[in-house]
Image (spheres, rainbow, N blue to C red):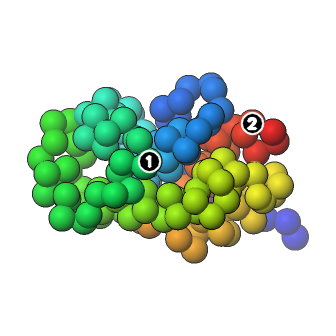
Amino acid sequence: MHVTPRIVEGWNPLGERPAANDDDVFELLTAAVFQARFRPAVVRVRWPGIRHAFAGFHLATVATWPDERLAALMDAEGMIRNEKKIRATLRNARDLQARSRQCGGALAYVHAFGGDEEALVRDADTWAHYIGAPSIRWFVRALGDTRRR
């Protein structure tokens, strides 16, 4: 019997366009983290503040931030004050940056799975923090056409 993998509903901050660079991939991953066990409508309203607090999701910048930056991020205007989500975003930036360096970019990391969504979900599930497989599936689907380029 075939079981359809569970995927969560979510709001895509990129709209209809596919991820085009490392920062877009990081923004989608962060959106998946913040929407996990939260209503997407709440995240959408708060997104401008979250985006500002995380330096516009500039992966190379956020990946250098230590966990000690957590207190300042918790106090940022518009931030969803969930320590686990914020800490996960800092750690995910470092882990995604490591994969970006290994593969020549975050999109190259995504492309390395040759369009096999479940393989990418399984791999991301080994390193992405504070996010489960259903939210990772949303992230993978939100990446859009980048998997087929």
Name the residue rendered at 56%, 26% in the picture.
15
Residue 62 screen position, x and y as percent: 35, 51
Residue 116 screen position, x and y as percent: 81, 57
Looking at the rendered structure, the secondary structure element under dot 2 is: helix
- Say which amino acid is labelled 1: Leu
Left or right of 82: which side holds 62? right
Which quarter of the image is occupied by the N terminus? bottom right
The image quarter containing residue 45 is top left
* Crowd rating for badge 2 (residues with CA inside 10 Å; few <14, some 14–19, many 20+): few
Residue 85 screen position, x and y as percent: 33, 58
Q: Which residue is mark 2?
A: 145
Name the residue rendered at 31%, 29% in the picture.
48
Q: Which mark is residue 12?
A: none
Q: Which residue is mark 1?
A: 59
- Say which amino acid is labelled 2: Asp
Left or right of 81: which side holds 29? right
The image quarter containing residue 77 is top left
Which quarter of the image is occupied by the C terminus? top right
- Mark 1 and 2 residues: CB-CB less than 8 Å, in contact? no
Q: Residue furthest bottom?
A: 126
- Report the front residue among 24 and 42: 24
* Crowd rating for badge 1 (residues with CA inside 10 Å; few <14, some 14–19, many 20+): many
Name the residue rendered at 38%, 64% in the picture.
91
Q: CA distance from mark 1 to mark 2?
A: 21 Å
Q: Residue furthest right?
A: 1
Residue 134 screen position, x and y as percent: 59, 59
